[in-house]
Amino acid sequence: MAYSRTQWGKWYLLVPFPAVLITLIEAAVPGQPLPWWVYVLSTGVMAAVVLTFCSLTILDGGEFLRVRFGPIPLLGTKIRFDDIVSAEPARTNFLDGWGIHYSPSKGTILNVWGYRCVRIRTHCRVYWIGTDDPEGLCARIRGKTAASPEKSAAME
């Protein structure tokens, strides 16, 4: 059975923010009104960013664990199951933030909402992948990594 899980964030609430902010600034500062396209462009840029980062999908891609943001799938990563050393449920905090970035103290963080995640250690990196199903994802990773021939030989 294939593993596929999508976590949704509530970033869509930010789409009207640029238009509201521009309207407030325009009301407070006297002068020429801004053209209509400034509102459309700023709201469109925010909508594109939100559509890129409003969900995080984790898929079992056979040899790889695939992690991608979406529904516009521009960013993401894939991790070979054979490279995974350990996977355990963990929690990020507010200072770790959301999105995709590197933290010197933790490693690569991929998260869209909330603080629940899975910490995945590979031979050379650590990933913190946000999910609303950390136990299920850990079980899937452990099942795939225990089945690899190199891991089975190393455990004996």
Image (cartoon, helix red, strand yellow):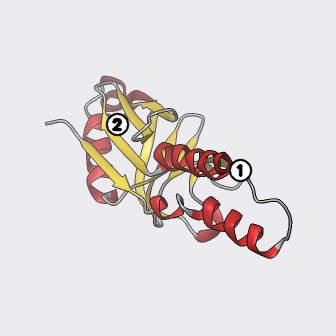
Q: Secondary structure at mark 1?
A: loop
Which residue is located at x 54 percent, y 34 percent? 123
Pick whichever, 25 or 147, lies toward us: 25
Q: Which mark is residue 62?
A: none
Q: Is tag 2's residue or tag 1's residue first in the polypeptide sequence?
A: 1
Mark 2: few/some/many CA within 10 Å (<14, 14-19, 20+): few
Determine the image quadrant of residue 132: bottom left
Label 2 – label 1 distance at C-alpha: 67 Å
Residue name at image x 48 percent, y 60 percent: 11
Callout 1: few (<14), some (14-19), or many (20+) C-alpha neighbours within 10 Å? few
Give above or below for 9 relative to 24: above
Q: Amino acid at mark 2?
A: Met
Q: Nearer the viewer, mark 2 or mark 1?
A: 1
Count of marks overlaid on the render: 2
> Considering only vertical position in the picture, is 51 above or below 118?
above
Frontmost residue, 46 versus 116: 46
Q: Which mark is residue 35?
A: 1
Q: Quadrant of the C terminus?
A: top left
Q: In the structure shown, which secondary structural element does the residue marked by tag 2 occupy?
A: helix
**Residue shown at the point (42%, 59%) measured from the top left:** 9
Q: Position of residue 26 (x, y in %)?
A: 76, 67
Q: Is residue 122 left or right of residue 27?
A: left
Q: Which residue is mark 2?
A: 155
Placement of the N terminus among the 4 image quadrants: top left
Image height check: is 56 above or below 122?
A: below
Q: Residue furthest bottom?
A: 28
Q: Amino acid at mark 1?
A: Pro
Residue 35: give x, y in percent of width and height. Answer: 71, 50
Q: Is residue 58 left or right of residue 79?
A: left
